[in-house]
Image (tube, helix red, strand yellow):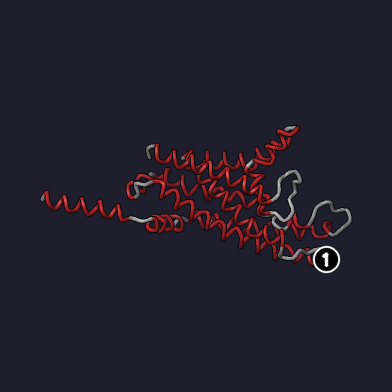
């Protein structure tokens, strides 16, 4: 009996050691796609991102073509993505905190003792999903919205900054997903993580513009909501921000710092 028990124990230990990242990725994908909230959130991303862009372009095409217009048509071609950002935050947070809420995270870490692999798998899946859906959503919004701009003679070709804004929207959504995963891992509470992420990215990022002088300008440029969104717009509404790629580099650095803190916290704290 003891020999059989030892054999099973050794076999189990070997199975754990053989477990690869692909296995963890597959398990996390099953969890992500089996939750209806994932698909409802992605549907909301498409509906808000593409739908609002088309509606706003339709409603403002006449004005944008008039001499009184003080905005570029390009500023409206991804307008809906500014609202759809919220869905990326929700998806990123739920990918982590839902397991803590149900207690399933204990089973996850029992199956995968190397917790960093779990965080990496969740991050890769959420970021990839948001990049693809975000890019497709931006393209749908572009083709629908640009139709109304074309009718007024102010349509924009899918090239240069417009093209960059299409995949840039996917990059921004993916970045927000990673940002939210890190916050969710640190806080482990759905409502708190969503509230803080939305407040930091969308409220505080706009409020710092009220601070006068160079300090206010610096904070306005480096806040995650401002730094990340520039790459997702052909023409930014805010002329004070840096160019697209320098701004996104700042956003990526902020994500890297948060993800590092999340990984350290994940290893050190109890499930």
Q: Viewed as shown, does residue 133 lie left or right of 150?
A: left
Q: Is residue 193 above or below residue 27?
A: above
Q: Viewed as shown, does residue 149 lie left or right of 97?
A: right
User: x and y percent of residue 212 in the render?
Assistant: 75, 32
Q: Residue at x 72, y 62 (%)?
A: 145
Q: Is residue 33 above or below residue 98?
A: below
Specify the quadrant that holds the C terminus.
top left
Task: Classify mark 1: helix, strand or loop.
Answer: loop
Observer-nearest of 213 and 270: 213
Q: Is residue 216 above or below residue 32?
A: above
User: x and y percent of residue 131 in the render?
Assistant: 57, 57
Farthest right residue in view: 67
Q: Viewed as shown, does residue 78 lie left or right of 252?
A: right
Mark 1 lies on residue: 153
Farthest left residue in view: 1
Specify the quadrant of the image occupied by residue 234.
bottom right
Q: Residue at x 57, y 42 (%)?
A: 197
Numbered marks: total: 1
User: x and y percent of residue 9 in the render?
Assistant: 20, 50
| Disc 1 crowd, CA 10 A, few/some/many (<14, 14-19, 20+) | few
Q: Residue at x 40, y 40 (%)?
A: 267
Specify the quadrant of the image occupied by residue 268.
top left
User: x and y percent of residue 3 in the render?
Assistant: 12, 51
Q: Is residue 157 above or below residue 102?
A: below
């Amino acid at each position: 009996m003891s020999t059989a028990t030892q054999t099973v124990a050794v076999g189990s230990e070997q199975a754990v050691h053989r477990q690869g990242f692909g296995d963890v990725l597959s398990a996390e994908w099953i969890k992500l796609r089996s939750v209806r909230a994932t698909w409802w959130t992605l549907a909301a991303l498409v509906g808000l991102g593409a739908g609002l862009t088309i509606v706003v372009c339709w409603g403002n095409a006449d004005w944008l073509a008039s001499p009184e217009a003080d905005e570029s048509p390009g500023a409206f071609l991804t307008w809906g993505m500014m609202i759809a950002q919220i869905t990326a935050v929700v998806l990123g947070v739920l990918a982590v905190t839902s397991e803590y809420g149900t207690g399933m995270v204990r089973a996850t870490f029992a199956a995968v003792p190397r917790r960093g692999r779990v965080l990496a798998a969740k991050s890769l899946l959420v970021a990839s999903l948001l990049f693809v859906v975000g890019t497709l959503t931006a393209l749908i919004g572009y083709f629908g919205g640009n139709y109304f701009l074309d009718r007024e003679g102010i349509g924009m070709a899918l090239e240069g900054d417009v093209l960059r804004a299409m995949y840039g929207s996917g990059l921004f959504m993916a970045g927000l997903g990673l940002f939210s995963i890190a916050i969710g891992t640190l806080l482990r509470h759905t409502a708190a993580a969503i509230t803080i992420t939305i407040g930091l990215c969308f409220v505080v990022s706009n409020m710092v513009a009220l601070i006068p002088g160079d300090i206010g300008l610096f904070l306005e440029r480096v806040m995650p909501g401002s730094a990340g969104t520039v790459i997702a717009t052909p023409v930014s509404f805010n002329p004070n921000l840096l160019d697209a790629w320098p701004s996104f580099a700042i956003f990526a650095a902020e994500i890297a710092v948060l993800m590092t803190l999340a990984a350290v916290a994940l290893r050190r704290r109890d499930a």
